[in-house]
Amino acid sequence: MNMQAQVMRRVGLGILVLGWGLVAALSPLSAAPYAAMVMDARNGEVIHARNHDTRLHPASLTKMMTLYIAFEAVKHGEVGLDTKFKVSRRATQAECVCLGLKEGQRISLRYLIRAAALRSANDAAVVIAEGISGSVEAFADRMTRTARAMGMQNTTFKNPHGLTQSGHVSTARDMTILGRQLFFDYPQYFNIFSRRSDFAGVANVPNTNRRFLDAYQGANGIKTGYTRAAGFNLTASAQRGSKHVIATMFGGSSTAARNARVAELLDMGFSRAKSRVAVRKPATPAYQGRSTLVASKPQNGDDDPNAGAKTIRLVTAVRKSPRPRPRPTPQLPEELLVAVAEGVDASVLETAAELSLTELAPEALEITPPPRPVFDAETETAEITEALDLAVAEAAGFTVATPEDLAALEPDADIEALDAVAQDGGASEDLPSTDLVELADATQDTIEMASAPVTSDMEGGTEVKPDPVALPGALTHDEGPAPEMLWTGAPESFLPEPVDTPLNLNADLDVAAPPALPAETGIILTRSDTSGQDLATAMVAESFNAETPQVISRISTSDAGRLWRVSLGVFNSRHDAERSLITVRMAESQALASGVSRVRQVSGRFEASFAGLTQTEAGRACARLSARGMDCAVDQP
């Protein structure tokens, strides 16, 4: 019995100790305080807040500041994304989640950024801190200074990864401010937080926030965190339409509970945020890089041999690139410049003396230029009119008589008799009809079917015109001086008045009303011997042969062989078809020189082609277009 009692006591004591151990292990998790904040990222307006200024353990939310300083260092030229950092022993001894780096290994900064942002690797955060600032402590101090410049007044950093450490605290408000600052200051890097996975130089690492990114609509980051003292933390960002909300939560009991609560906070933010808000970007904090000198003060004074050495960091970042100095311009000696100027002046004088301008003057060369012709409008008009009259007369069949022909012309007795009768007035009535007929027959070769020639009185200036209906016996003739021009040949004049009307030689000639003759110019026009009967026959034939004038409304540009065309295809609009024609015409202007551009509408679409080509021209043009990569086809419509 005693043995059994002792065993029971020991078993009960063990159970009691185990229970106390479990309670002690779970007590930090359940004791993690809750804090939250919801902010409109567009203007920084706080939508919801609870315990938002309580200083708590931020856990891996710390890495948001680590990454911010890494981006800042790249921006200011301290390091580059391809700069390789050496892994120290301290980095390999980091606790919890790690990338698996080995001491002495060298890895690029871009891979370290991916590992810290996605995998939340603690060793990668340590390598970043040592690579930029030389030590974890110096980097943590820079983190705190940057936080103060942002307005994070309740935040103090002691390490770059966020593991629990005395004095390493922040608030929900400060972490929300940091998330918003990352979005506006470095938008080119913010997409890293929304990647589900990425290659980190050693392996492909997943995003610890991928579940929330997949579950919540519009989520685009940014960082998770967990420690026993902090609980499950998350700073999340989401965009829907024109709204952008950032929420932070501290003290979650599990990943699922945290994600559900943050989703509720974001829904609250989207429901309360205004649709149209002016974006007000936060001010970029002052640069806290290597531009400042930092020295660690010895604890025991400078004279103490056991005192620590001073650490002085020099400025290495290039803040401003100076403009290079201009190259010096070579200066020639003043004596040389004067000598050159004097030599040029002497050469100019010698050349001017050799080629004297006075010797080249027209007076010196005894050359008198011809006088400039004087334009006389009346003389020019008369000459032009005379030339036109002569040209029209020659076209009608007249010829220019020579002075010898003019001298051979003598008055005919019969004509003089007719003139005497005309002067006697009514004496013609006393003549018998037989005498009139004989007199008319005697002069038939000259005046048959014609009106008497028009004569003018040179002294009185009066003009006597015959009666177009009177018989030859009734013709009158002026006994004044002989005219300087005689019109002979045709019974009617082919020379119209010089008026602004077109000349129509095919029109019916009206013998009864002869046109007025041109002014006398002293030129005698004659015509070959033609009888009156021949002239009447020619006039009748001319009237029958005259064709009816045709109005030409369109001139064809193609002949019997130009029935081929080059088709460029069918287009949806006339504009596209015309543009295709212009493009092809510019490309092959020589091959399509004789082609006519045409756009034809077919079934609601527009066909572009070049028509009016021969089969050879169309084939050559299409071959050249095909060589240029343009579609075409040769066909005969």
Image (cartoon, grey):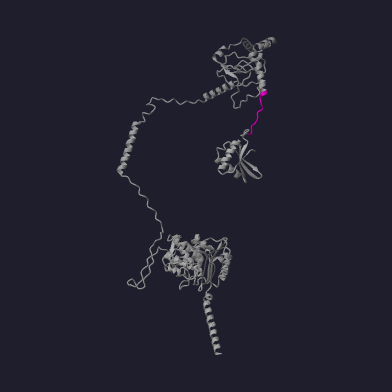
In x, y percent, where is residue 404? 55, 13
In x, y percent, where is residue 39? 53, 66
- Circle count: 0
Residue lying at the far bottom in this picture: please name it: 1
Q: Nearer the viewer, residue 332 or 619?
A: 619
Asked whether residue 595 appears in the rendered view, the answer is no
Above/below status of 281 relative to 227: above
Residue 407 covered by magenta stretch? no
In x, y percent, where is residue 466? 64, 17
Give the position of the C terminus as an image quadrant.
top right
The majority secondary structure of the magenta stretch comes to loop
Left or right of 339: which side holds 69?
right
| Residue 609, picture quadrant | top right
Query: Residue at point 52% right, 26% down?
Result: 377
The magenta region covers 544-554
Asked whether residue 521 appears in the rendered view, the answer is yes
Above/below status of 426 relative to 383: above
In x, y percent, where is residue 119? 51, 66
Q: Nearer the viewer, residue 138 or 131?
A: 131
Left or right of 377: which side holds 357?
left
Give the position of the N terminus as an image quadrant.
bottom right
Residue lying at the far right in this picture: please name it: 433
Above/below status of 122 relative to 542: below
Q: Nearer the viewer, residue 506 or 117?
A: 117
